Amino acid sequence: MTLLGRRIIVVGLAAALLGAGAAAICFSGLGGLVDQARERLGTVLLVGDLLVEPGEEVTLSASLRHGLRLEGVAGRRVQFVLGDTLLAEVRTDKNGDAAVQWKTPDKAGDSVVRVRLNAGDQPSTAVEDAELRVAARPKETKFAVVDLDKTLVASGFIHVLSGDAQPMPGAAAVLQRLARDQTIVYLTQRPDFLGAASKRWLLSNGFPPGPVLTSTAGLRPGEAGLRPGGAGTLMIGSGPYKHTRLAEMKRTFPNLVVGIGDKFSDAKVYAASGLRPILILHVDWSEDEPEDYEKLAANLAALPDSVQAVTNWSQIASILFEGAAFPKKDMEKRLIQVARDLRERGKD
């Protein structure tokens, strides 16, 4: 599939959600989906959460976008509000971006800044407010980095869009417990236009609060803009994207303790970045093709020995709180044995 085609699919799916709502989405084909997107996507405010030190001067930024291509909307007044206090009102520039400098409180904690469009600049279909979380933490804070799709969400983000996404059993309880002494960072390659839906899903399913770090769609090649993560990080691949974001985090916060995800690239990047890597492996044990098990085993074999390979959040809890170990080599052996057994049965 071409790069343009991938962009259309991702933007089209998100557009349908941002417009008339998940219930009206019809997954009958790309053409129909794009048609729905063109009809439904109005104007949206995009923001990116921040992870900073207490008392730090930071840039609060937002981007006002419209239409299927998420084109910038210039000359509109964007307000940044903390509690009942208006921090600033800034007009969007020619690219639809608005930003303001702000000093975080001296005490560690989360500040949730509501970003909204001035009532006088609202289009006929009102633009939904956005929440920008500024997580201020001391340098010595411990962090757990967690993916979303097929890690916390039992399926991919398409099911989030359609409104039927379920959490992985036990995931919320484990992270709530872990959050007692570590800050949870949700690091996902989902694009920023899915940020609001992602935050709503986490909240509604009982996950602890934490910054949600997203990628950007990069529909305007070469433009860095003001949004965290830079332009085009959606298309560089999950591994390179997460490697870059983790490197950014480690420059200020060296204690990135554990990384949890479902992709082999996740595990590899977590290990390379000095985190304890936990890989959630989704195995269909009813599969009767030995090659599928052998392929999974080969992918595991290519990972660093520090990777823990699990299939559920109960095992993750055992690792985090009970000192248990699930070496990836054990899973490799199990997969290879299943493949052998299938081949033997095939001979019979």
Image (spheres, helix red, strand yellow):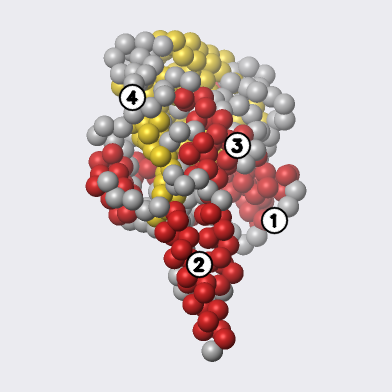
Residue 162 horizontal/vertical position (percent): 49, 54
Given the image, on which type of amino acid does mark 4 rest?
Thr
Instruction: Check contact, mark 4 vs mark 3: CB within 8 A.
Output: no
Q: Which mark is residue 240?
A: 3
Question: Disc 1 designates what residue?
Answer: 31
Q: Are marks 3 and 2 in contact (CB under 8 Å)?
A: no
Q: Is residue 71 left or right of residue 251?
A: right
Q: CA distance from mark 3 to mark 2?
A: 30 Å
Regarding residue 224, the answer to whether it shows in the image is yes
Q: Nearer the viewer, residue 32 or 107?
A: 107
Viewer-proximal residue, 162 or 222? 222
Q: Secondary structure at mark 1?
A: helix
Above or below 96: residue 155: below
Mark 4 = which residue?
141
Tell which circle, 3 or 1, labels the residue nearer the N-terminal end.
1
Name the N-terminal-most of marks 1 and 2.
1
Instruction: Say what amino acid the circle numbered 2 marks.
Output: Ile
Residue 336, numbered circle = 2
Residue 233 horizontal/vertical position (percent): 62, 34
Ranked by sequence position, the earlier of labels 4 and 3 is 4
Mark 1 and mark 3 in contact (Cβ < 8 Å)?
no
